[in-house]
Image (cartoon, rainbow, N blue to C red):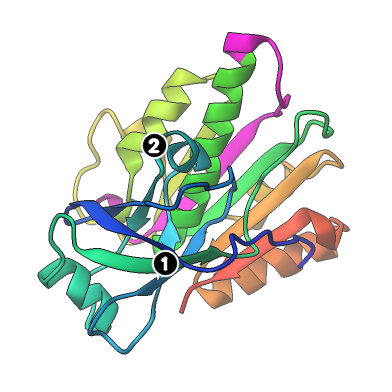
Amino acid sequence: MGCAAVVIPGLLRGPVGAICTQAALLRSTRSAVRHLSLTRVDFFIPGVSVVGGFSICSGPRLLEHERMIELAVKYTNHPPALWIHNQCTLDSEVAVRVGGEFFFDPQPADASRNLVLIAGGVGINPLLSILRHSADLLRERANKGSGYDIGKIKLFYSAKNTSELLFKKNILDLVNEFPEKIACSLHVTKQTTQIGAALKPYITEGRIMEQEIRDHISKETLFYICGPPPMTDFFSKQLENSHVPKEHICFEKWW
């Protein structure tokens, strides 16, 4: 994998600012936090011996401007996830270590890149962070006439059915805000109910096909893949076989 990591040293400590069924907002009380596009945190909970590892689904501007990160936490029997869903309350204090090797953080003078984001299931979480960061870069460019000149962004996202397509409203809001720059193809593999009219134009029934991804290959394009290991292995191998440089393929597996 050809992506480098930049890690905030040490632990950040702070209270939980909000908690709901899909996400937790953590407010950092550290005096200085750099603007970083990292997508994962280790979660240290008082009284819970197991360390939780969760994906950041917010963009780095939320951390930079409001000193908050948003985590997507699925309900499971994993002790940290159980604590978040069953015991965590407003202002519960936790510690987090922020890091990861799966991020997109271009500098203003860097060459313009297109992004292809390939998500399976809850693998959407870190890719949503990248998508939100891309939207922030587009807003900055539009408002100031300067900053990083990002290319086009295409999201391919597959889940069993439309109810399991997480953050679909957030995704479509960004597609509608930047129709010339951001596009998405949402795939469902086991849909049994009728698809709503608003969502239907973006839905393909069936898995993401190799040709769809190959159609986006260019020397200016970076590929980010996150999903079940077989899916991640398949697409990363397909891209390598299509002569995409390894440094243009970033992936993260969830188990």
Q: Position of residue 96 (x, y in %)?
A: 42, 67
157 to the left or right of 134:
left
Residue 165 or residue 5, whichever sits in front? 5
Q: Residues within 10 Å of mark 1 (few under 14, many from 20)?
A: many
Residue type at the position of mark 2: Glu
Mark 1 lies on a secondary structure that is strand
Q: Is 151 one of the magenta-colored residues?
A: yes
181 to the left or right of 120:
right
Instruction: Say if residue 207 shows up in the picture.
Output: no
Q: Is 49 one of the magenta-colored residues?
A: no
Q: Position of residue 59 (x, y in %)?
A: 48, 42
Q: Position of residue 84 (x, y in %)?
A: 21, 68
The image's mark for residue 66 is 2
220 to the left or right of 192:
right
- Tell me where the magenta segment starts and ends, as one range: 142-163
The image's mark for residue 96 is 1
Q: Residue furthest front?
A: 31
